Structures are given as C-alpha cells and as structure tokens.
Image (cartoon, grey):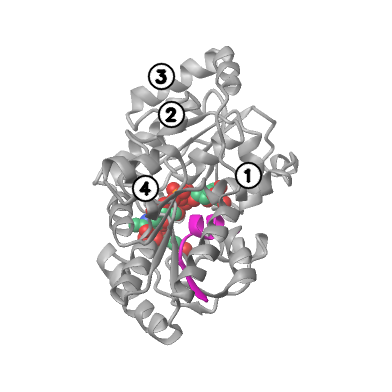
Amino acid sequence: MKIATIFGTRPEIIKLSTLIPQLDMEFDQVLIHTGQHYSYKMDKIFFDELKLRDCDYTLNIGSGTHAQQTGKMLIELEKVLLLEKPDLVMVQGDTNSTLAGALAASKLHIPVAHVEAGCRSFDKQMPEEINRILVDNISDYLFTPDENSYKNLTCLECFPSDKVYLVGNTSVDACLRTKQLNNQEYLKSYNLEKRRYILFTLHRQENTAVDRLKEIIMALNMISGRIKVLFPAHLRTRKVILENKIEISDNIILTDPLGYNEFMGLLVNSKFIMTDSGGIQEEAAVLNVPCLILRDNTEWMYYVEMGKNMLVGTNYDKIVKVVTDLLENDSKFVEIEKIKISINQGATESIVAILKKELSNIKTI
Ligand code: UD1
Ligand code: UDP
C-alpha cells in the first residue's frame, strides 16, 4: 500500500518526524514537501536535526496570499498524486499545505488521514480554523490529539465515531524524544541562567498586523526591564518588525528562528514562555513550563482548563499585569508546576497500527 505524506511548514515537519520513519517501515511512502516554508531555519534545519530522509517531491511553492499559495499547491499536488496514485494521503495540522493536500486528494477520491484532527479555537478569523474545519470534513481517518478534539468531532459536529480515533499527539512523542537531549549548554551562548529568563515567540497572522505587534512588543519591552527575554523571531514577524522599524529594547535578545533541539533546551530551562504558537502550548505543558498564551482563545483548551497554561490576550495592560503578578509571586510558579496533567504518549504507534489494520481491510475488499 502506498501512502503520500504531504506537508510544508516547520511544525508539520517536527510533528511528522516520529511518524515518517515508521510509515517508511510499514508502507511504500512518498514524501511531498509543498515548499510553504523554505528558509533554512524554517525547513532544512529540522531535516538535518531530526535525521529525516530527503523528500521525493519538493514543490517550491513559497510565500504568497492564501489564494495564491493554496491554489499553486493544489495545481502541483494534483500532478504528483495522479502520477503516484497513492492509496492514502496523510496530512497534519491546519496550514495551507494541510488544506491543499487534503483537497487535492479528496477531489481525486484518494482517502485522507488527518493527524491532529478536531482541534477548534471557535474563531474563524484565524486562517487555521478554516483550514481545520475544511480538512476534517474531507478526511476519512481523523486522528484526534485529546478528548476535547475528539468530542468536538463526535459530539459537536456529529462525525461518525468509526472515523474518529483518539490517539494523542505525535508532537508529544517528538518532544519527549528530544527532552532526553536537553542540557543547559544552549544557555551559555546567550549568557542566560536557568529560570532567569523568559522565552517569547509570536507569528500568528492576527498578531503580526502592525498595530497589534507594536502593542505586544511595547509590553515585552516593559517586561524586559525586569527579566531577560529571548525572542527567536519567526521570519514573518522579523519582516514586520524591520519594515516598520518597531523598537526592541536592548534587554531583549532577538535571534533568528532556532533549531528544535536548541529551542527545546531553552524552553525547558526558562522561567516561563509567552507565545501565540499552537505547538509550543502543548510542549510547554509536557515540559512543565508555565505558558502565557498571547491570544484570546486556543484550540488547546485542556491545558488552560487544568491551570497549566494561561490565556492572556494581546492587550498591553493585561500582559504587563499578568507578568508582573507572576514575577512578584514565586509561589504561583510552584503551584503551576505541581498541577498534574495527563499526557497522551504513543500517538505515532497508534496511528501506524490503525492504518495498517484499515488499509489491509481495503486491500482485501
Ligand atoms: C504558517 C501557517 C501557520 C503555522 C506557521 C508555522 C498557514 C495559513 N499558516 O504561517 O498556521 O502556525 O506556518 O510556523 O498555513 N517566510 C520566510 N521564510 C520561510 C517561510 C516564511 O521568510 O521559510 C516569511 C515570508 O515573508 C512569508 C511569511 O513568512 O510571507 C509568512 O509565511 P506563511 O507560510 O505564509 O505563513 P506563516 O506565518 O509561516
Ligand atoms: N520551534 C523551533 N524553533 C523556534 C520556534 C519554534 O523549533 O525558534 C518549534 C517548536 O518547538 C514547535 C514548532 O516549532 O515544535 C512550532 O511551530 P510554530 O510556532 O511555527 O507553529 P504552530 O505550532 O503555531 O503552528
């Protein structure tokens, strides 16, 4: 049986990194990279670090508006799928590459497996929310990462329960594997000390609109007067900062995007992280690092409900208040660290086992 795995961005590479080698062992797998992310530090660095094999196809789609990017991907993906004729297409997450992969396949009547299905922020202003809803609705195997996402599909959206699997998230498998490599070596290059700095990332479309970004950075500048801040900037964010000459305080260490091992090493040793990333919210919870979410909603509500992660939003006063309160009350960190959460390990193995069983059924029909 042949599986075509389609992806194109940093988080997809990381979250598929445990699955790709396993699928190679069990199936004839074709790896198709849309080229949505292409700069070394958003793409190839992860293939090198995570020891992933070369892709069979790289489509070099690059950046553009949503329509340009998704449209070009559809055109190129259709050609490859017609040539390769896979029995199943696998996509991950909620990016334009995810949508294009699922749509190109379903129009050719190729079954689609969606890893990280059922996540909902219930905010259609996010391009990712639109992608998730559409991809779930054209997928045949929906691999959900947690109970909330499982219930979103089976209870709220009435998907047939035999299509929906609660398997956990492959990002947890990747994170736990990398955790073993973590040490404090990475801190030295930035002159940082364990628990005496915070990590900050930001890249969402809605947060990189100039006025919103200025407000968030103003809050960060203020916070950096009290504690060191390391800010590995996504290239989208870096571009908006440079083009609009947004001032960054000298107490903030602004860097290029980091490799995964380095990022994990810096996350696990930080006092807390402030981010609007989806994947980092879960990694922070797994590594027991408090996470302040710079958004009004999240598709990863379980960790918020448990009190591990906090929805802070993007308002200057609110951000400064929450951070100041935290920095002045060390007992709050102890309380957050003590909260026990359930972490679903082994999503990678579960997905492979389900596909082996399901695809062998198709073959014998
Ligand atoms: C995309 C996903 C988002 C995901 C994020 C992960 C969509 C709609 N968005 O957002 O869900 O969280 O990836 O990081 O699919 N750029 C570079 N080099 C690169 C990639 C991007 O310079 O390798 C710059 C370009 O200026 C580009 C901008 O970043 O225009 C945005 O890139 P794009 O892929 O459109 O969206 P992301 O913000 O990366
Ligand atoms: N990440 C990384 N280097 C960085 C920032 C993030 O390796 O400088 C990793 C992070 O550990 C996580 C993934 O990139 O696994 C998250 O990607 P991103 O925040 O771009 O996307 P999202 O998860 O929001 O879709």
**CA separation in Å, label 3 and label 4:** 33 Å
Q: Determine whether the residue tagged by mark 4 lies in a helix, strand or loop.
A: loop
Q: Residue at x 40, y 29 (%)?
A: 219
Residue 321's tag is 3
Of marks 1 and 3, the one in the foreground: 1
**Label 1 near ligand 2 (CB < 8 Å):** yes
- Where is residue 191 shown, x and y percent of the image? 69, 37
Q: Earlier in the sequence, mark 3 or mark 4?
A: 4
Under circle 3, the secondary element is: helix
Q: Is residue 13 magenta?
A: yes
Depth-wise, is mark 4 or mark 1 nearer the camera?
Answer: 4
Residue at 62% x, 64% y is 22
Query: Which stretch appears magenta?
Result: 1-17
**Is residue 259 within the magenta segment?**
no
State the CA–CA distance, disc 1 to disc 3: 27 Å
- Residue with the mark numbered 1: 264
124 relative position to 297: left or right: left
